[in-house]
Image (cartoon, helix red, strand yellow):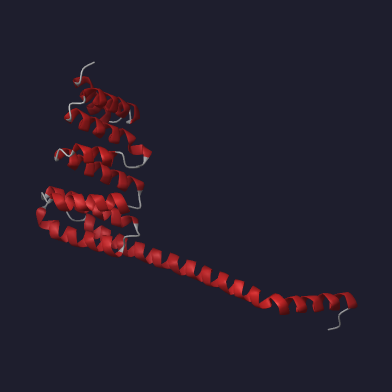
Amino acid sequence: MAYDLEEQEQLDEFKAWWKQHGQKVMTVVTGLVVVYLGYQSWNWYQNQQSLKASAQYENLVKLDISDTKNLKAIQSISGEIMDKFSGTPYAGRAALTAAKANFQANELKSAKTQLEWAADHAKEDAIRAMALLELAAMQVQEKDYASALKTLEEKHSSGFDGLFADLRGDVFAAQGKTAEAKAAYKEAVEKLDPEGHFVKFTQHKLEALGN
């Protein structure tokens, strides 16, 4: 195919440019392809992990946590999910389920360990907030008020602010700090769902402290 003079000059310029920069271009393109393929492979792997974790979690939630006969099975399945599928949302849910089962069986140390794990590793904000609340509630039962207040200061989803404030009020009330308890309960009343049932209990606790 014949080229006119201008086209030939452009072709010669491109050949010269490619001779100088072609290797760099190919290196960059190859790198981008590798990154893209790696990204696709990672997504595939994550999807496979999520599917496996989901199947295991379905087996877990079928077990009645109130029946201590299921405790070993719950501990085993939840442990496997947390160990093998920690990057999925099901790991935090499994830890929370195991904590509840351990608490029901009076395995309090194990329950706290599971709650701490969920608070540190849960991928879902709601699960993390629930773990923090249950951990703080256990610390209150143990009269470890300093630890409970520290737990309640942890960053959490704003949707749980009312529940955190209510439990903080319980801590202050248990310590005999009436003014602080009132302030916490008032904050809880403001942030809890006004149509919900929980807010009524908070109001009763606030009224019980007097004016």
Drawn side of residue 65 relative to residue 26, left or right = left
Which residue: 18% across, 38% down?
Answer: 140
Q: Give coordinates of residue 76: x percent, y percent.
A: 19, 62
Horizontal and vertical percent position of residue 30: 58, 74
Image quadrant of residue 164? top left
Q: Residue furthest top?
A: 211
Foreground residue among 90 and 161: 161
Residue 100 placed where, x, y %? 19, 49
Report the number of numbered marks.
Answer: 0
Quarter of the rendering containing residue 130: top left
Residue 68 seen in this snapshot: yes
Q: In this view, does 157 lie to the left or right of 141?
A: right
Tell me the residue at 48%/67% (across/down). Answer: 40
Q: In which quarter of the image is the C terminus?
A: top left
Rendering coords of residue 172 (x, y %): 22, 30
Q: Establish if 159 lies above or below 119.
A: above
For the N terminus, give its image quadrant. bottom right
Q: Residue furthest right?
A: 5
Residue 129 vs 176, above or below: the answer is below
Residue at far front of view: 146
Q: Is residue 65 visible?
A: no
Residue at point 24%, 27% (across, down): 202
